[in-house]
Image (spheres, rainbow, N blue to C red):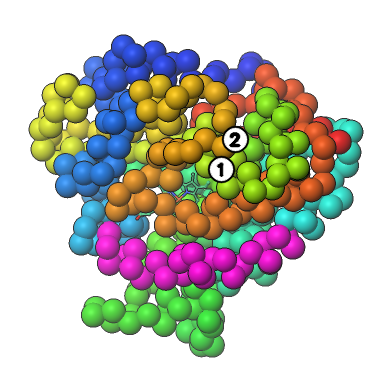
Amino acid sequence: MNDASPPVDPYQGYRALRDDAPVCQLDAGGPWQISRHADVHQVLKDNETFSSEVSLRPPEERGQPTMLFSDPPLHHRLRKLVSSAFKPSHIERQADRITARAELLIQDLPRGEAVDLVTTLAAPLPVMVIAEMLGVEDGNLITFKNWSDAIFSNIGEILFGTPSAEAEQAALEMNGYFLEQIEAIRRSPQPHLLGRLVATKTDEGHLNNEELLSFCRLLLIAGNETTTGLITAAARIFHEFPETLSAIRHNPELIPTFIEEALRYYSPFSATVRRTTRAVTLGGVEIPKGELLIPLIASANRDERVFEEAATFQIDRNPNPHLALGFGIHFCLGAHLARLEGKIAVQCLADQFESIRLADPSQTAVGGLGGPKAMDVILT
Ligand code: HEM
């Protein structure tokens, strides 16, 4: 890693916001930052007052809406089309294949020297899994990852401003690739998720190319960066609290609560966005209609008002009402998959290594949206 200056830890800033200005605009006219658990929870729960249709760009520029950035009834229609593929029973069936992939990625990692956990495990595992679900596992997974990075890191510009040339190019290439796949599936139907979507007939007929592309984009992007973030969060926790790795090695039943606590402690989807549909009072502060809000999920998950010793990692924390996977109608569609991938990655790491340390802790960012681009670790 060669960033010049150490990354900033946002958690101190979140605490100051929660204590002093839990609902506030950091710049006049800017978005409202929502930092307490109760307020973030209310925003995510009340989708009528807090809309996910946040973009003000004209529809022809925005392209086909995705479920993440739409409200009912469109949201429900889009979600229903893919939800069965993400049901726990369906996801569980992938466990052995995900484990085999994780073991393969981990088996040759060098011991005792710095190795980038992002390029070796945390990034490829989620790309492989979603590519297989979409039936495109023969495609170039590094290219998928690069497209997803380029679009994810420009999400603000895509929604609110002018997307960068890099994001436009990535979207163009990705659309071209998936259009070819869709055409091939129309000629020769397939049983995988994309094949089923192509075959799906709604009251309005088959999904058109734009609708299909928007599903591919959302699934590839929503599931990648965030799951990479969860796996790197786990590694960071093993570094900061080495006793957690030995606890898991001796008692693998702790893995589910470890994952929930990792989601809380270093929430990979650190913030989301909403727009008010009416004037509303939130946390005692009046917010006019049409304002943009940033519910700070990572801050809500460290709220001392809800979590005892919120700044401490408790491997068996229970209950753990974190909001890392969202809440309400937009609750993460891939939650079962994300948890399964996280559990398998942690289990494989714990099986193989007695110690996982960051090579240079000062150079590893936390609290961003998604995971770090690189994370050098020393495995022994
Ligand atoms: C650790 C990994 C993950 C985290 C932390 C995460 C987090 C979230 C959060 C917080 C939301 C709600 C956003 C909002 O309300 O504005 C969300 C929605 C979503 N997630 Fe995930 N996610 C993860 C993995 C995945 C995976 C693996 C997939 C699928 C392959 C996925 C697909 C989605 C989709 C499609 C939505 C939109 C749901 C809707 O609008 O109804 N996510 N995720």
- Residue type, mark 2 in image: Ile
Give how far across and how far down residue 200 sits, in percent: 37, 80
**Magenta part of the chain:** 75-101
- Give the residue displayed 30% in from the left and 49% down from the top: 328
Asked where in the image residue 297 lies, by quadrant, the reply is top left
Mostly what secondary structure, the magenta segment? helix
CA neighbours of label 1 inside 10 A, class few (<14), some (14 to 19), many (20+): some
Number of disc labels: 2
What residue is disc 2 on? 315
Crowding at dot 2, Cα within 10 Å, few <14 / some 14-19 / many 20+, comes out as: many
The residue closer to the viewer here, 315 or 181, is: 315
Q: Closer to the camera, 52 or 266?
A: 266
The residue that appears at 79% across and 48% down in the rendered structure is 351
In the picture, measured across the screen, residue 194 lies left or right of residue 50, that is right
- Above/below status of 221 relative to 84: above
* Labels 2 & 1 near each other (Cβ < 8 A): yes
> Is-magenta flag for residue 87?
yes
Determine whether, in the image, residue 349 is placed left or right of residue 89. right
Picture quadrant of residue 228: top right
* Quadrant the C terminus occupies: top right
Q: Which residue is mark 1?
A: 257
Above-or-below relation of 278 to 185: above
Residue drawn 37% across and 51% down?
Answer: 331
Point out which mark residue 204 bears: none
Amino acid under disc 1: Thr
N-terminal of the pair, mark 2 or mark 1, is: 1
Q: Position of residue 299 (x, y in %)?
A: 41, 27
